[in-house]
Image: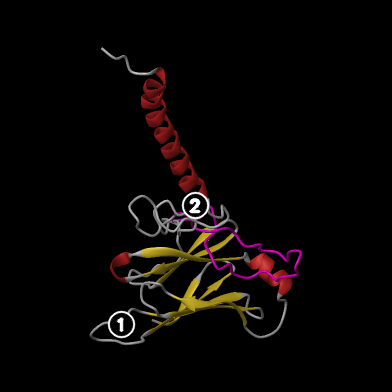
Amino acid sequence: MKQPSPQRHTRRIVLPLALALLLCLALNAVAFAQPPGDPRQPQTGGPSGDPGVNNPGAPTNNPGEPGNPSPGPSGDPPGATETSHPGAPFTPPANCIVAHAATPAQLCPVGGGLQYYFIGPGGTSSGGPWIASFADLAGHYATGGGVSLFSGSNPFTGKSVDITYLPSEQKLRISTYYPDNQYDVNKPYVFTVDTGNNIKHEAW
């Protein structure tokens, strides 16, 4: 009986090994050929493919950073921030100063100033601008007409919200509207707040 040559036996072993090695090299080449992506760019989707999943750029329920109630390096005067004070509770606390059950706005002492809350139908609420203390406002706006501190809208109703400081009276004026209903559309809700946090309604 004829024995297989050692050369033929070597070919049987080397050929599958060479093919396996080539396959591994090809897979590695494909993996390295894909760009790793720019680490500065936020991910647009997570494992589910939904936007916002594992997305560092997605909005969070962060109440915001405080504004600087006194003039800062840029010389910005005190006023109202665009976002809530970081120490403000998520919902209006018990010490709020607007004693009116159906109010579309609420003010609460927070951080030496006043935290404004947007109020929506059914008592829903969301933190709005934080207003600097009366002492900071009076120190910068000693005289003159009304100074606009904030102008925006209630996210629940879409109604405008204007917060004005009145230097000559040392008061804040809050002007907004009730939510529309079957009886009233654009019904105004306007009140003032003095340095003792006393409320006087002008339209309600």
34 or 176, which is in the foreground? 34
200 or 91, which is in the foreground? 91
Magenta range is: 61-89
The x and y percentages for residue 75 are 75, 70
Q: Is residue 49 above or below residue 130?
A: above
Q: Is residue 132 above or below residue 49?
A: below
Q: Is residue 138 above or below residue 62?
A: below
Write down the residue under mark 2: 34
> In the figure, residue 16 lies in which quadrant?
top left
Left or right of residue 9: residue 114: right
> In the figure, residue 99 lies in which quadrant?
bottom left
**Screen quadrant of the C terminus:** bottom left
The x and y percentages for residue 203 are 42, 84
> In the figure, residue 137 lies in which quadrant?
bottom right
At a point 66% along the width and 62% down the height, the residue shown is 68
Q: Amino acid at mark 2?
A: Gln
Where disc 2 sits, the SS reads loop
- Precedes in sequence: disc 2 or disc 1: 2
Q: Is residue 98 visible?
A: no
